[in-house]
Each structure stands twice: as structure tokens, then as C-alpha cells.
Amino acid sequence: MSQKFDIQQLAELVRLNLKPDERAKLSRDLEKILAYVEQLQTLETDQVQPTSHVLQIENVFRKDIVKPSKVRESVLKYAPKRSNQFFKVPKVIEET
Amino acid sequence: MNTQYESVIGLEVHVQLKTKSKIFCACSAAFGCEANENTCPVCLGLPGSLPVLNEKVLELAIKVGLALNCRISERIKFDRKNYFYPDLPKAYQISQYDMPVASKGFLVVEIKGDGGVLTEKRIGITRAHLEEDAGKLLHEGIKDGSWVDYNRAGVPLLEIVSEPDLRTPEEAFQYLVSLKAILQYLEVSDCNMEEGSLRCDANVSIRSIGETKLGTKVEIKNMNSFRAVQKALAYEVKRQTKAVESGEKIIQETRLWNESKSETFSMRSKEQAHDYRYFPEPDLVPFSVASEKIETIKKSLPELPKARWDRFKTRYGLSDYDAYVLTSDKILGDYFEACIQEKADPKLTSNWIQSELLALLNAGKIAIGDSPVKAKDLAGLIRLIGNNTVSGKIAKEILPMMFETRKSAETIVKEKGLVQVTDLKVLEEAADRVIRANAKSVSDLKAGKKQALGFLVGQVMKETKGKANPKLINEILTQKLPIQ
Ligand SMILES: [Zn+2]
């Protein structure tokens, strides 16, 4: 059991149903990743700009122009459940 | 036991920015369309689609940041806020975590004291960041599930976070009024709470006066008007004070406002177990904002409420308070100035708008922008008062008729024969009749009781069905009945 994270809680957050052996394997992987990050953290990075993106480009914009995509019907057709023009999902809140 | 408490309030306002298309795709951002009509692979979160930032969104956000005296970031980026909820097709919301568009600003709020005296209070703005809106869930009347409409998913939002500088629910209300006014003046949003283009969540805690540490804060959501925010905060301050006084501990939680019951209630703890695991959005490249661009936008800012308030005082000679009321709502200020354009007297116009017009509008729950009496028509009525065609008293009867019939004041005056009587002969005859019928008041007046004059003027007004010019009657009566 790791001291740094709770594998079960992480699995719940990302909606993964992990079997016990998967849990153990992923825990070991995560341990290794975190150990590597720890190693990185010893580096002097005060003068380095944080990299938030791997590509050396910036300022990619689009103009504020509307272009209807007309995909509604084709997407709804493949939705697990629909009701007319709506997507249908399991009830998410109880009546208050 | 007699500890005095103060409340510490911070507000988070989500404002929908007025663009034609969504923040990251070319779908329409319009309200009130057919369900899921405005969706595409990007805002539905389909694999392989890529978001691209709408240029206009960033420009509008910078505008707001500048108007709120913020520092505009030279570099900004977007981050993913991860959580599962069916209104979020991608299972994450594109937002901004540590590099928001704007930060460290302030907003000057007018706090109304006794007798309408306004005191300024500076409220810090922590930050303003961009994000995409989520879809809309429908539950009502659906037994076996919920329906989802993603038209709103991806509509651009700017979240404006205040410092916990507000001390009372009233201050929170005034902050919202001032913020809305600025957003309206900037024309960056429709600011319509019913349509969801302006939403507000509040953080509130209490502490003993003199204490500098913050108490445990509670977040309140689900308020659908500025007054509801004020009421929810007042309720929550009371609830927390009572809890603390009886030795209970305040729990950090999210509570929802129930408007019909006028109380807040705790959301189930399961839904509060949030851990958003923010990380940089790999699908969007970073952005740099050139200082020249900021300067250009700064120069393009329109006149803001404070500047207009000052101008209304100096240019039109209005009082501090009157000028504030007229400029705290852009549409009201525009209405006033449209009247002035039509050559109506400024002070008279200010009075007529604030008393008669607003009373009629409020009674009918009509917004000033939808007033059946347009500025041009109110100006017409005020000009008739100014040139003595009608008395103020008759004008007060004409305005509701204008409301109902949408006819101009001139037309109504002509149709109903309401022209003010300035014919001296007619007025003198009426005065004589009143003098004959009111011997008691006449002798009182002659004996020096000046109140009697007011009574007699009133009687002549009655005699002429309110159409007499009160100034002329006054002169006639004083002349006919000299004090002995
Ligand atoms: Zn879209």
C-alpha cells in the first residue's frame, strides 16, 4: 500500500473497476512514475519557463463565426439512450 | 457570551460572454434553440476533435479584466478540470487553473447608508478566468432518467472571483449591482439571470469581530436573483451564528438555496468528494497577450458607470444620489439621456423617471427597456410641464394614460382638453367663487394665517379640475386677499 496515493480512491475518481491484481500492478507503476517525478524535482528549474505544451506554437485562434455542424441526428442515433432530441442518462439527482 | 460576529463573504460570478459562436467550436451560442441543435464533435467531446479558441472570447475577457482594474496576464493557458457528470460530455471542463486572463483587480462599490448617503468601498478581485459552460440536465416529470441538452456546453463563460472583502449580505447585493452595471456598459454580456447568462455562487463564514483568521467557509449555490443571493447569505449568517453560539462546529460544505422555503440545505456529501486533478489542456496551445493589444483594448473601452455618474452631476446638475441611480443601470441612463436629447429639462426628467415612471414600471413588472412610454414621449410630457401647458398634477394623470394607450402626451392633452388654464379671467372667476364659499378661511388668511392660502389654492385647483396654474392662482388670491 502506497503512502503517497490511494489507488482505490483514484480508481473511483476516474470510474475504473479494478480487479485486485490490476490494482497491485497499477500501484507499482504509479510508484515508479512518482519516483521519477521526485528525481526531476531535484533539478534547478528557477530560470526555466514551465512547459505546458510540447509544440513551440502559440496563439492559435478561430474567428467568431457560426457554422452549424448538423451532426445531431447522427450522434443521437448512436447514443445508448435517447428521447426525441435529447440524450437520456440514468437519473442523476433525487427530487428535492 | 455576548460575542459580536461579522460575516466574511466572497462571490464567484459566472458571466456568459456575448459571442456568436461557442468558445472552442463554431456552434451557435444562442439561447432558446431546439435541444442539441447547437452541437458538434468538439462540444460533444467526440474522439479526434480539437478545440480552437474563439478570438472574440479572449478580447471580451481582457475588456472585463481592464474595467475591473486587473493585471492582464502576458501568458495564459487552459487546463482540464476533471469530474464525471452527465452535463459534461468530455468528463472534464476546459478551464483555467493557474494562469487566468486577469488577476489582482478591484471594484468600487457604493454602499447606501442613512438618508441615501453613498459610501465607497473597494472590493478586491482575485481573478477572472475563462471556461466553457456545461450542458443542461432536465429531470422534471421524467421518471426513468434525465434528459441532456448540450446546446449550452461550450458556451463561453468568464468566472469573476472576488476577495472575501464583503462584510454584509447588503454589500454583496451592491457588489453584484455594480459588477452587472460594468458588464452592461462594456456590452460583453446580456447579464440575464433567468437565461443563465449571469450566475452567482457565494462563500460565507463568520468570525468574532477583531479576529483576523477566517472561519470555516460554506459555499452556497442555486440563487436565481441578486435578492436571492442577499437572502441566502442573510439566512446562512444567521444559521452559522446560531450554530457557533450553541457550541457546534461549522462544516466546510456546499449548501443549496431553496427559494420557496427561504433556507439553505446541505448537498449530499457524496457529491462533494471532488478532486479535480487539474492539468494543462494538451489540445490547446498557450497564448501570449501582447502589451500593444492590451493598450488597444484599453483605448476602446466605453464610458463606465463611475465616469458617467460624474458626468451626470457636472453636466446636468443632478444630485450625487440621483446621478448614481440613473447610471447604475445602463439602460436607465440611456433612457434619461434620450429624454435630454429631446430637449426635456434634466432635473425634471430625473425626478419624473425616478418617481412616476419607475413606479408604473415596477407595478407592472416591466423592464425599463420595454417601457411602453418611450424616452421621446416622456420628454414630450416633460416639455408640456416646462412650458406651462399642463400642470404637474395633471401630468401625473396623463402618464398612466400614455402607458395604457401609447399615445403621445400632446395627443392626450388635446383629446381630453387638459390644457392648463392660464386665462386670467377664468381663474379670477374661479377664485371669486372659492372666496364666497369659504368665508372662514378667507378671514383666517386676512388675519395672517398663511396655511389658509394653501387651502384656498387647493380649492381653486379643484374648481378648475386641476387644470389651473398654481402659481397664477397664488398671485390672484394674494392680490384679492391682502393680509391686514
Ligand atoms: Zn460545437
Image (cartoon, coloured by chain):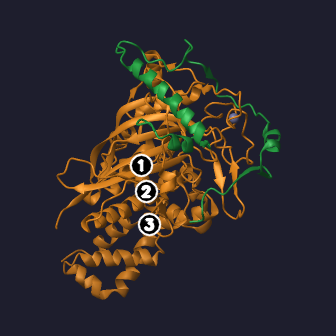
Give the drawing colour for chain A.
green
Q: Position of residue B436 (x, y in %)?
A: 36, 85
Q: Position of residue A87 (x, y in %)?
A: 74, 49
Q: Helix, strand or loop at disc 3?
A: strand
Bin the neighbour count of mark 1 within 10 Å (Cα to Cα): few under 14, some 14-19, many 20 and up: many
Return the residue at label 1: B176
Q: Ligand 1 within 8 A of label 3's CB?
A: no
Return the residue at label 2: B229
Among the 4 quarters of the image, the one containing residue B39: top right
B62 over B209 or under it: above or below: above
In space, the residues marked 3 and 2 are separated at their CA atoms by 11 Å
Residue under the image location 34 percent in, 86 percent down: B438
Asked if marks 3 and 2 fall on the same chain, the answer is yes
Among the 4 quarters of the image, the one containing residue A26: top right
Circle nearer the N terminus (3, 2): 2
In space, the residues marked 1 and 2 are separated at their CA atoms by 9 Å
* Residue type, label 1: Leu
Q: Helix, strand or loop at disc 2?
A: helix
Residue under the image location 45 percent in, 60 percent down: B228
Q: Position of residue B105 (x, y in %)?
A: 35, 34
Determine contact: label 1, label 2, CB under 8 Å: yes
Residue under the image location 60 percent in, 59 percent down: A93
Q: Quadrant of the N terminus of chain B?
A: bottom left
**Relative side of B62 to B370, left or right:** left
